[in-house]
Structure formats: C-alpha cells, structure tokens
Image: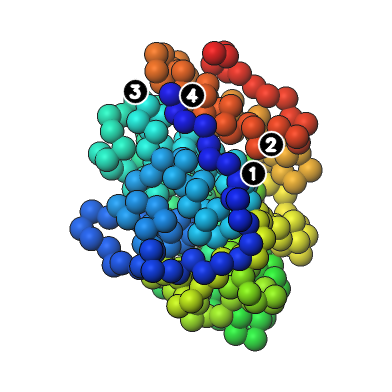
Amino acid sequence: DPPSPPGPLKFNGTKLVYDRAHPWKSLERDDIRGPCPGLNTLASHGYLPRNGVASPSQIITAVQEGFNMDHSTARFVTYAAHLVDGNLVTDLLSIGGKTKKTGPDPPAPASVAGLNTHAVFEGDSSMTRADFFFGDNHSLNETLFKQFKDFSNRFGGGFYNLTVAQELRHQRIQESIATNPTFDFTSPRFFTAFAESSFPLEFFVDGRNPVRALSMDNATLFFRDSKFPVDFFRAAAPTGAAFAQDIFKAYPIAAGKNVNGINTFTPDPTSADFSNFCLLYTNFVTKTVGGLYPNPTGVLKRNLIINLRYFYAPISDAGCTELFPYGQL
Ligand code: HEM
Ligand code: MG
C-alpha cells in the first residue's frame, strides 16, 4: 500500500537549509525539472531525488524540511498533484515531463505524465512560464521573467513584494485573456494561480528577514537556476498560501475562461472559487480524477481509494463532505 504521509516537522523554526548535506549540483543527463521552482530547487539540492522523480512522502518531507511549508498545505497540494500526474501503483511522480522512471502506465485516459501536464494541475497565466497554448509551459520564459523583474522594479523598488504580486497576477491574467484563445482560469487553476503568486513572498525570502521582499538576484537563483542563495535559511514558521486572498482582492475576478477565442473571457459558475472551497475538492475528485480514472480495477482502484483519503485528510476540518467514488476499503 502507499505509505501514510510523514507528519509535521519536529523543529519548525527557521534554520540553514543550504547546508553541507545539501549541495547544489548541476543537472545530469536525464534529470527532470518542471514548472515549479520550489520543487526544482529541492531536487537540485538533494532534498528530493536529483533525477526529479519522487514519491508523495518524499515531496511532503522535502517541502517541509527545505522551505517550511505547513503540513496541511504540503499534503493537500502533493496528493492533488500525485492523483492526476503520478503513478498510483508505483507511488512515483515526475516533477516535470513524462518518464519511464515512474513505471508502467495504467490504462488511458490516465496519462501519468508528470507536473508538466496541462490543465489538471499546471495551468495558464503563470508568472514565469508561458501558457500551454504557446508551446513550452514548464521552462523559464526569458520574456516573462524580464516582465517579472520590470514589475518588481516599477512596483516594488527592485523587489518582488505583495504589491508586485498583486499587479503581476492581474497583468498575467489580462495578457492571457487578450492573447490565448484557450485561456482557462477555472478551478483548480483559479486557486493555484493566487497561491503560487504568494509562494515567493513566503518561501523564497530568507527566514531571518522580517520583510516580505524578494531580491531579483535571489529570484533569478530560484526561478532560473533551481538554487538556494548562499547561506539561505528557510521560512521562520510553517506557512501555506498566506497571501493568496490578498492578491485576489486587489483585482477580484470570477473563475472563467475564453469561450470563443481571445477576449471572450466568461465567468463559469460551475467552477469553484474563494466563496466555495468545497467545490474545489468536489470537482477535483469527481471531474478531474474521475475523468482520468472512470473504471479502475485491482491495485489501481485500491490505491486511488487510499490516495483520495490522504488528499481529503488535510482539509477534513473545512466541513466538506468526503467523497468515495471508488468505494471504501
Ligand atoms: C508552480 C506543483 C510546492 C513554488 C507550480 C506548478 C506546479 C507546482 C504543478 C505549475 C503551475 C503553473 O504555474 O502553471 C507543486 C507541488 C508542490 C509544490 C506538487 C508540493 C507541495 C511548492 C513550494 C514552492 C512552490 C514549496 C515554494 C518554495 C511555486 C511557484 C510557482 C509554482 C512560485 C509559480 C511559478 C510561476 O508562476 O512561474 N508548482 N508545487 N511550489 N510553484 Fe509549486
Ligand atoms: Mg502554467
């Protein structure tokens, strides 16, 4: 069976994480990196397997140990990703593209294609990665990263801070509306977009620094080189998407998509949003996971049941009704 997730950190304060036991190493042939600068960095320092293929337990341990992500957020995000992009039989997930290293594939329509897979977790209007419609949705895009730095200069005095996060999130959404005919900003992307705009403030700023402002030198290390700054200390306390709602409130927008080409953004009332968190869980289980696994059998079905429980556990106090689309063990 897939093992129970690891618990919270025993010591959950700040500490040196770019230590002797975790040297940065450049990529070797076949090492995989993907759309998430956090996981890329953890892999390049050996908090995750350097080849970029990991189990959910390894990811939960690494994001807590290396960045002090809080236990609930770590579990919820990791099992969400694993359910749609990972191999539920071998318990392995690629943090980037599809690879044989995750083992034999289950029957279609499941794809087990790693975090690069578009529309199940990865989504449009990322800050430093292009929309899938334009091709590469996972590598650092130099034009977008230049815009990231321009916005940090214009709105943050050379630093990525909350104001920059708000302005840039809005800008990226407007760009996608105006240029990407397939732009989709419905759940889960609606949530992950605001959460990920918050993450650099929480996780890429040194834990000894009380000011939530990320320098462009350090942003370049994380986003481009998958590398901690020298002497880097992780966040001072466990944290999740703390500023997501603040970023949303600066420019509130309904969940929706371009329905008929560019500039046809239309709200989708069937999507979850901040006023209906349980619908995120419900739609993800029934539509997203259910679409990939309409009729599982054997070990696959058993492990779906187990992973869906691990996915629900961290939100069990949110008052959402737990779903058992594949029954219970
Ligand atoms: C983006 C997965 C933890 C920072 C992403 C994306 C995925 C992902 C699939 C791409 C979404 C998109 O932009 O289209 C995960 C998983 C995690 C995790 C499964 C497990 C807990 C973290 C942590 C950090 C982080 C701990 C920070 C230390 C980011 C940032 C982005 C991102 C900043 C946005 C990149 C951009 O917009 O250009 N993550 N992530 N993530 N992740 Fe993670
Ligand atoms: Mg994206």
- Earlier in the chain: of badge 3 and badge 2, it is 3
User: How far is mark 3 from mark 1, CA to CA?
Assistant: 31 Å
Q: Secondary structure at mark 2?
A: helix
Residue found at x 39% / y 13% = 298
How would you rate the neighbour count of disc 4 (Cα within 10 Å): few for under 14, some for 14-19, many for 20 or more?
many
> Which residue corresponds to mark 2?
315
- Earlier in the chain: of badge 4 and badge 1, it is 1
Residue found at x 56% / y 80% = 215
Q: Quadrant of the N terminus?
A: top left
| Residue type, mark 2 in image | Ile
Q: Given the current orientation, which residue lies at the most extreme front position? A: 10
> Which residue corresponds to mark 3?
107
Query: Mark 3 near mark 1, Cβ–Cβ under 8 Å?
Result: no
> Which residue corresponds to mark 4?
304
User: How far is mark 4 from mark 1, CA to CA?
Assistant: 20 Å
Residue 184 vertical position relative to residue 234 in the rendered view, above or below: above
